[in-house]
Amino acid sequence: MKFLGIDLGWSSGASGLCCLGWQAGRLELLDLQRQESVSDILAWVDSWLAPDESGGIAVDAPTLIPNATGMRLPDRLTHKYFGRYHAGCYPANLGSAFAARTVAFGLSLEARGFQHAPIIEPKQPSRFQIEAFPHPAIVHLFELPQILKYKKGRLAQRQAELARLRQYICEHLPQLEPSLDVAQGKIRVPEIPLTGTALKAVEDQLDSIICAYIAAHWWYWGLERNLVLGDRAQGYIVVPIKSAMPTH
């Protein structure tokens, strides 16, 4: 199995891309990069997962948007469960400027055989896609009191918070199950840069690592250690957790 994490640029701009491989009972980092165009992102997907190959994809973007206005069910549920961590997500509806792009991306993955999987049988060969949201995943996986605020604020603050995320990825993911030791292999997690443009590039890549890990965690544990916010009809987000919680 391989697990792809895609921190999709909702309206435009580059997307962070990560590929994790499942080998000998652990995860390994196989690729980490960014691509600008949707066609290049899909070509990257095809390069790592052939048409007959099992794998999971977690996308940080609303790929299912059934509602014409307002907020989706999963958007509301992130505020209900994770608002106290400052981890409520941005609302999505069909009137949103990004809706056509993100929904079309999900359909492109479906055309490649990656079916939406708000329900899964753990540790079985499959070809699936899910929607991910890194903020609450980071809170739960690393047992934090609130999100890491690396997306907004002054440059120095963003650098410090992104450095914390990098540290958690490098030091804590190897201790979790499934284990991801990013120190192994040829691909290295980038250092935290000093300029804003370069910082955004690293932010996208680190988010994509979290997304790929969410896909692997979902495949490994299913509902035993993941919360599903929403459903196939109304949109859904998969969030790793430490113990079982009800689906919605």
Image (cartoon, helix red, strand yellow):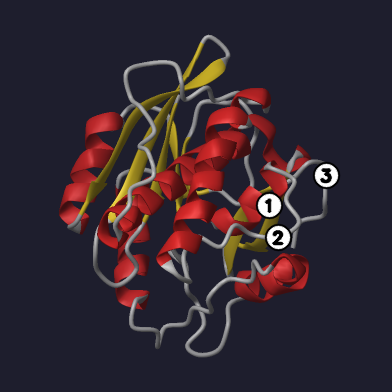
Residue 106 appears in which quarter of the rendering? bottom left
| N-terminal-most mark, 3 or 2 | 2
Image location (x, y in percent) of residue 238: 61, 52
Tag 1–tag 2 contact (CB < 8 Å): yes
Residue at 58% in and 77% down = 72
Give the residue pinned by disc 1: 139
Position of residue 77 in the picture relative to residue 16 (left or right): right
Residue at 68% in and 52% down = 139
Give 184 or 20, whichever is nearer the viewer.
Answer: 184
Give the residue pinned by disc 2: 146
Three-letter residue code for mark 2: Gln
Three-letter residue code for mark 1: Val
Give the residue pinned by disc 3: 244
Q: What's the distance in space between the residues labelled 1 and 2, CA to CA? A: 6 Å
Residue at 78% in and 41% down = 242
The secondary element bearing badge 2 is classed as loop
Image location (x, y in percent) of residue 81: 76, 66
